[in-house]
Image (cartoon, coloured by chain):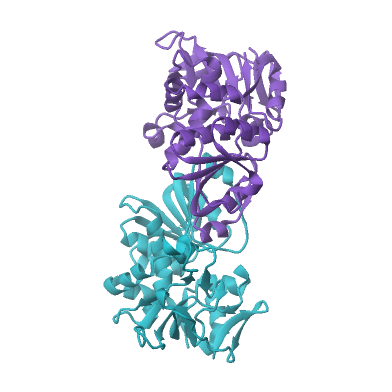
Chain colours: A cyan, B purple
Amino acid sequence: MLALVRDEARVRLTDTWPAPTPGPDEVLVRITCAGICGTDLAIADGYAEFTGVLGHEFVGVVETDGPWRGRRVAVGINVGCGACRRCLGPGPEHCARRQVLGIRGRDGGFAEYTAVPARNLHAVPDDVADARAVFAEPLAAALRVAEQIQIRPSLRVAVLGPGRLGSLIAAVLARAGADVTAVGRRESSLAVARRWGLATAAIEDVAGADFDVVVDATGHRDGFARAAAAVRPEGTIVVKSTCGVPAAVDLDSVVVRELRVIGSRCGPMAAALRALHTDGAWRDRLDDLIDARFALADGVAALARAAEPGVRKVLLLP
Amino acid sequence: MLALVRDEARVRLTDTWPAPTPGPDEVLVRITCAGICGTDLAIADGYAEFTGVLGHEFVGVVETDGPWRGRRVAVGINVGCGACRRCLGPGPEHCARRQVLGIRGRDGGFAEYTAVPARNLHAVPDDVADARAVFAEPLAAALRVAEQIQIRPSLRVAVLGPGRLGSLIAAVLARAGADVTAVGRRESSLAVARRWGLATAAIEDVAGADFDVVVDATGHRDGFARAAAAVRPEGTIVVKSTCGVPAAVDLDSVVVRELRVIGSRCGPMAAALRALHTDGAWRDRLDDLIDARFALADGVAALARAAEPGVRKVLLLP
């Protein structure tokens, strides 16, 4: 089948990748739409040393016989062992033996087909089109922030890097009632945030602004220092960026200013799909984030486009 | 007067330091006992670029006329502007214009006298001897951890670096009901922890141990990485160490494992003095931590002694 894969330290398109054979308790999903994320770009550059089919944001139709057959689905990307205390308790996100679709030890969704455990499936409501349902995974990652900190109406939050993920985080936290400022370098990113009714500021202007919470969604190694400069004493920095390199962090300042730092990764897929289904405002917002559509056959060019400065979501259509 | 001071990038004893003149709302305190802390050693080495009289752990007697005259006191070390929202609200610890005794912009207590604002005074109960009251400041810093995280009976906590501060933190968290393990390199530190009824472990043995909370009180720049290796996914690292140099932190791992990091500094002096007054167990414990007493006149030798590996508290007697 056609697939965008990484092996031998490079990304290439192939039409001879073996179609997956679902294992026990797994189903075959025919991919109908996929999205390119910052993590895919980092992986293409060597982050996590992944080899296999890229892609963890996608929607598709189940082709395996059984209760899911013919249903449109989004897919939780963490595949746990199913037997450990983490898997049996809160979920597979922190299973020590987990695979992660397109990120760690398991093929992803930039292909014609993928095989996933049935327990990872989430039905997509009929009124949520593919090009919106494909946002379920990044929207879930944005919602994760609201699982980790208590959102209050008077909470002053800055989101650094209002790009493909940061925009969603800013919108989620504003929707939850916080006082959100989108902070960026690029006028085009800030224009979208303003269209969504968010306050905006230039990255150069927020040092010393004493935000209660600063979310680093810059994807850059200097994002943490920027966040630390913008947060108040005893404030919280939520780190969403993975950059593949250790950052030089002024831990003394974390101690002296008694900062709180929270790492944040995957979020609740079901809640994301519920938001896409019930909250009409997401429809227009997601359209604002889609910069381009490529055929899967042009996947290498699609990745290059997604890596251009200021480009937000690029979709891949198998 | 006699004073241990840092100026021109070195620490020296002088007997010609001018005795302080209390300003408005300040009192003169005659120092009777002081303690040497890891931060003093870092400052002696250049941390915070402090110049003036060293020392922020001390007890003394008020000599200024007024309601405090003749009373034994411990002293809160943060001197705020008294007018900002932080000072008028939670306290001076995070006032942007604060001075900190012996640390930032204001002379400390390794001297015969010091002048401090009356609002920073805390009366020492009669049954708390000087050599114990001098622990009020570091004990408050230890109690700060219990202000920042919720202590529960089943909470598995590791304290890395059970030295002069780490020992107090371990004892405080155990007293508050957590399941505490003191983790160190040195058998002598672990022996004290064991005498106090705490579980102990060697630093080499805790990687992968999945503690709920790990407190880094090592004072070393590699302490954070050790803590990160010992904490569970979604666990909390409390950072007590200031080392004067930026640390190379694996922020990607903080994100992927969704760790929480909390910087922790000064704590509640009144609560510390209450503990020393009401909890008899502290008497013996504090005696365990005192390794040496020096006359202030031998202050330079006292600092050298305190810097030796495995030495905990060294007291200075003016």
Residue A177 horizontal side relative to residue B92, left or right: left
Could you tell me residue A75's position as x and y percent? 42, 76
Q: Nearer the viewer, residue A302 or B129?
A: B129
Residue A71 visible in the shown view: yes
Q: Please determine whether, in this image, residue A193 is positioned above or below residue A255.
A: below
At a point 54% along the width and 91% down the height, the residue shown is: A1
At a point 55% along the width and 20% down the height, the residue shown is: B58
Total labels drawn = 0
Residue B30 horizontal side relative to residue A135, left or right: right
At a point 51% along the width and 27% down the height, the residue shown is: B137
Q: Please determine whether, in this image, residue A170 is positioned above or below residue B20.
A: below
Q: Please determine whether, in this image, residue A228 is positioned above or below residue B242.
A: below
Could you tell me residue B307's position as x and y percent? 69, 30
Q: Nearer the viewer, residue B159 or A223?
A: B159
Could you tell me residue A215's position as x and y percent? 45, 57
Residue B189 horizontal side relative to residue B234, left or right: right
Could you tell me residue B107's position as x and y percent? 58, 23
Q: Nearer the viewer, residue B39 or A1?
A: A1
Q: Nearer the viewer, residue A300 or B35?
A: B35
The answer to which image quadrant residue B122 occupies is: top left
Residue A190 visible in the shown view: no
Q: Please determine whether, in this image, residue B274 is positioned above or below residue A61.
A: above
